[in-house]
């Protein structure tokens, strides 16, 4: 009997049915294998955290420049490790306006913790900030560590440190541009160079050590670039002092 299948028959001939089963199984295994290869080739998500919905209390001194930072004293005399927190407002907004009247003062506030690779940030609940009696807390002066040459990428600190994953690269460029336009502190993440450890995170500041204009970095976000800049440090925070007009893409 011929193995030719006619649609009105109740089932296909045994030989043809067996062949089709093998084809379908083979295609299924092939698709699964391709999927596994594609998944394994993807970069893993960074070990970053945004404690969304977990609102904590923080108390410390507000340092306004170059970007609002909360210095938390554990001993009452000095700031210990992991006790500097960059401050941002909800959404795609920096905290300059929110924290301006509290500059130099001891405050108690509430917010959600963001962290990645030892860099900490707090998204502040706007109506939670209260002045508290001042304590003898020391905030270090900015130290000049000298010139460095580093290659890497400009990102917005809020997303990169944990709010988005991934928070860098071309896929995140548009989001980063809007965040930086809203006043989120820009961070330069290095891939190599003569930085102290060759890799790291640096908050970007202007030639005078102050805040960069919101859109001054727009053409260089998520692009490979090399910076020749002055390296600064205050506590655990590291900075690169740059002139946006001198920026060039690495491929140039």
Image: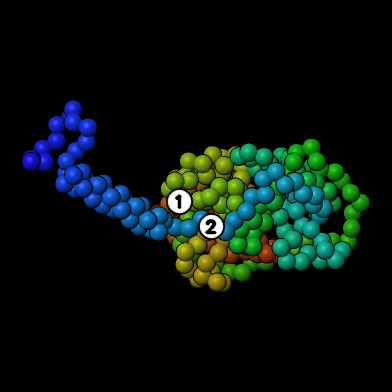
- Residue placed at 43% from the left, 52% from the top? 223
- Residue placed at 74% from the left, 61% from the top? 83
**Which mark sits nearer the N-terminus, 1 or 2?**
2
Residue 48 sits in quarter? bottom right
| The furthest residue to the top | 8
Q: Is residue 252 left or right of residue 165?
A: left
Viewer-nearest of labels 1 and 2?
2
Q: Is residue 118 left or right of residue 9?
A: right
Viewer-closest of 132 and 31: 31
Give the CA separation, mark 1 to mark 2: 13 Å
Which of the labelled discs sits on residue 46, or is there none?
2
Which residue in the protein does label 1 denote?
169
- Residue placed at 55% from the left, 47% from the top? 164
Q: Is residue 228 left or right of residue 234?
A: left
Viewer-closest of 59 and 9: 9
- Residue placed at 21% from the left, 48% from the top? 18
Label 1 SS? loop
Label 2 SS? loop
């Amino acid at each position: 009997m011929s193995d030719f299948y006619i649609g009105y028959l109740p089932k296909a001939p045994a030989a043809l049915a067996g062949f089709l089963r093998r084809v379908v199984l083979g295609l299924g295994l092939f698709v699964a294998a391709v999927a596994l290869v594609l998944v394994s080739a993807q970069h893993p998500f960074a070990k970053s955290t945004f404690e969304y919905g977990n609102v904590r209390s923080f108390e410390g001194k507000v340092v306004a420049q170059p970007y609002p930072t909360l210095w938390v004293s554990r001993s009452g005399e000095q700031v210990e490790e992991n006790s500097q927190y960059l401050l941002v407002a909800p959404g795609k907004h920096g905290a300059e306006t929110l924290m301006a009247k509290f500059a130099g003062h001891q405050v108690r506030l509430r917010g959600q913790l963001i962290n990645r690779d030892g860099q900490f940030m707090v998204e502040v609940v706007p109506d939670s900030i209260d002045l508290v009696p001042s304590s003898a807390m020391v905030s270090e002066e900015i130290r000049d560590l000298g010139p460095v040459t580093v290659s890497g990428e400009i990102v917005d600190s809020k997303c990169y440190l944990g709010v988005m994953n991934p928070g860098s690269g071309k896929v995140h460029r548009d989001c980063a541009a809007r965040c930086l336009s809203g006043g989120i502190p820009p961070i330069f993440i290095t891939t190599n160079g003569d930085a102290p450890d060759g890799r790291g995170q640096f908050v970007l500041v202007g030639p005078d050590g102050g805040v960069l204009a919101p859109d001054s970095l727009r053409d260089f976000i998520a692009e490979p670039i090399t910076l020749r800049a002055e390296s600064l440090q205050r506590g655990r925070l590291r900075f690169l002092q740059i002139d946006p007009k001198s920026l060039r893409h690495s491929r140039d």
